[in-house]
Image: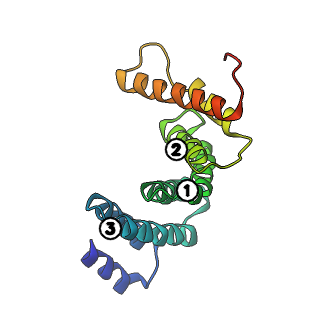
Amino acid sequence: FREAREQWKALEGESSSNIASVTNSLARTAKLRGQNEKSLELYLDALEMVKKHGKAKELYRIGLAHKNVGMAHRTLWQWVESVPHLDEAMVLLSDRYGPVNSRTLGAQESMVDSILRGGMDEPRVVSLSQSAFAGRIKPGESGYNYDRYVDSGVLLGDTRMVSGDTEEA
């Protein structure tokens, strides 16, 4: 990937959507190697390039890049820092895929979890977790989706305990 990135830089300069793609792959490789700080640094670089070179009709790519940065912050237990990235990801991915798509809901669940773990005072936390819970399962879905449904239900319970809202759903 490093060699490919250097070749793209020779062709396109220091920043392009192609270099962002290769940088994203380098970030994922760093994460798999346990180099979490390096992974975050590379994901941030890729995000900046995607924002600079992305096309208006491809805003979801910026959403995916924000989700990567948010998740990299979470890997480092940087809960508060992850929230704005996951929030932006949730908005942009929802615009592209809809509010109950697994990409949108994954960003939303991770954001709510980061809010709770970071001890943030966020008034949207209950409504966000309720919408994640409501959009999770439909009759006939796989066990994987059922497990995600249970995770969303537990998260909803946690948010209600934190907020003091104990009314039944």
Is 92 left, or right, of 106 in this rendering? right
Q: Position of residue 62 (x, y in %)?
A: 54, 59
Q: Position of residue 19 (x, y in %)?
A: 40, 73
Is 61 left, or right, of 35 in this rendering? right
| Residue hosting label 3 | 26
Question: Tag 3 or tag 1, which sits nearer the N-term?
Answer: 3
Discs 3/2, front? 2
For the point 44% across and 84% down, the residue is 14
| Residue hosting label 2 | 110
| Residue hosting label 1 | 82
Give 77 or 95, whichever is nearer the viewer.
77
What is the crowding at mark 3: few (fewer than 14 residues within 10 Å), some, or many (at least 20)?
many
Q: Amino acid at mark 2?
A: Ser
Depicted 90 relative to depicted 158: above or below: below
Q: Are circles 1 and 2 on residues that touch, CB within 8 Å?
A: yes
For the point 50% across and 17% down, the residue is 138
Q: Quadrant of the N terminus?
A: bottom left
As measured in the structure, the alpha-carbon distance from the residue carrying label 3 to the one carrying label 2 is 23 Å
